[in-house]
Image (cartoon, rainbow, N blue to C red):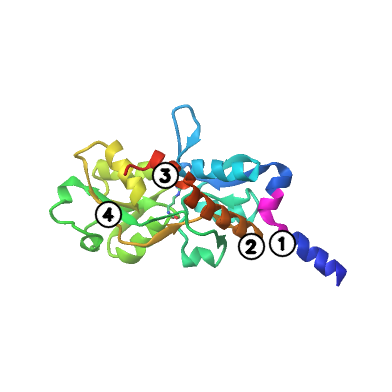
Amino acid sequence: LLSVCAFAGIAQAGVIDDAVKRGTLRVGMDPTYMPFEMTNKRGEIIGFEVDLLKAMTKAMGVKLELVSTSYDGIIPALLTDKFDMIGSGMTLTQERNLRINFSEPFIVVGQTLLIRKELADKVKSYKDLNSADYRITSKIGTTGEMVAKKLIAQAKYSGFDNEQEAVMDVVNGKADAFIYDAPYNVVAVNKAGAGKLVFLDQPFTFEPLAFGLKKGDYDSINWINNWLHQIREDGTYDRIHAKWFKS
Ligand code: ARG
């Protein structure tokens, strides 16, 4: 009985406890998701979620280590201990939640569309794209891809490893529409050059973004959720949000 209790005690400590002992929290992310995690000209990874993670690790008293990981393999990488936690703009889906645990959401987003300017009169919603005449694109392994295959199933779909390449396909007329999370498209439509793309900015899915942890680590989930409540009330969240999002 004693050894069973001792084992249970260790098992319940979790990745946050380990990080405190080690002095570092390792967070897996694919830094291509504006304005949450992206690489600046000096090669530094910056963004809204990066700033949240900096505040989180500061409260923990540890260093933040960002582990760049392709989005497609990010859950397997978590499950094989390449890092402690996923912090990569990840939508909490019921399908993913069967494989990993999630913290409470830190923001809610939804899918939107960037379409070829020439289609502006014909295409007013994702429903208008649901025909074999249209080619749509998104990023491999994301909810954009899942939603494209589910809600716009008649269209021809091709995915990219990188959001930017997928957007360029629409800019160059090789694809008709890019389906992706609203905050990314807000930034992308301005970057890709005004007049080339039309932004259908009404989100048509409900997507809470949250931190992902291995199953069973409730101690760490508890710490993160309580920290999220704290920063929402003490002004930290609003300050960081205002830095990266207009209005
Ligand atoms: N929210 C979307 C998803 O969970 C896209 C996230 C992409 N994140 C990234 N770091 N590129 O699939």
Q: CA distance from mark 2 to mark 1?
A: 7 Å
- The CA span between labels 4 and 2 is 43 Å
Which residue occupies the extreme left position in the image? 121
Q: Residues within 10 Å of mark 3 (few under 14, many from 20)?
A: some
Numbered mark located on residue 135 in the image: 4
Question: Do we see residue 68 in this rendering?
Answer: no
Give the CA separation, mark 4 to mark 3. 34 Å
Looking at the image, residue 89 lies above or below residue 31: below
Return the residue at label 3. 241
User: Considering depth in this image, is 12 or 84 the residue closer to the camera?
Assistant: 12
Q: Quadrant of the C terminus?
A: top left
**What amino acid is labelled 1 in the image?**
Gln
In this rendering, which labeled residue sits more in front, label 4 or label 2? Answer: 2
Would the CB of label 2 be found within 8 Å of ligand 1? no
Q: Residues within 10 Å of mark 2 (few under 14, many from 20)?
A: some
Q: Secondary structure at mark 3?
A: helix
Residue visible at 30% across and 61% down in the picture: 204
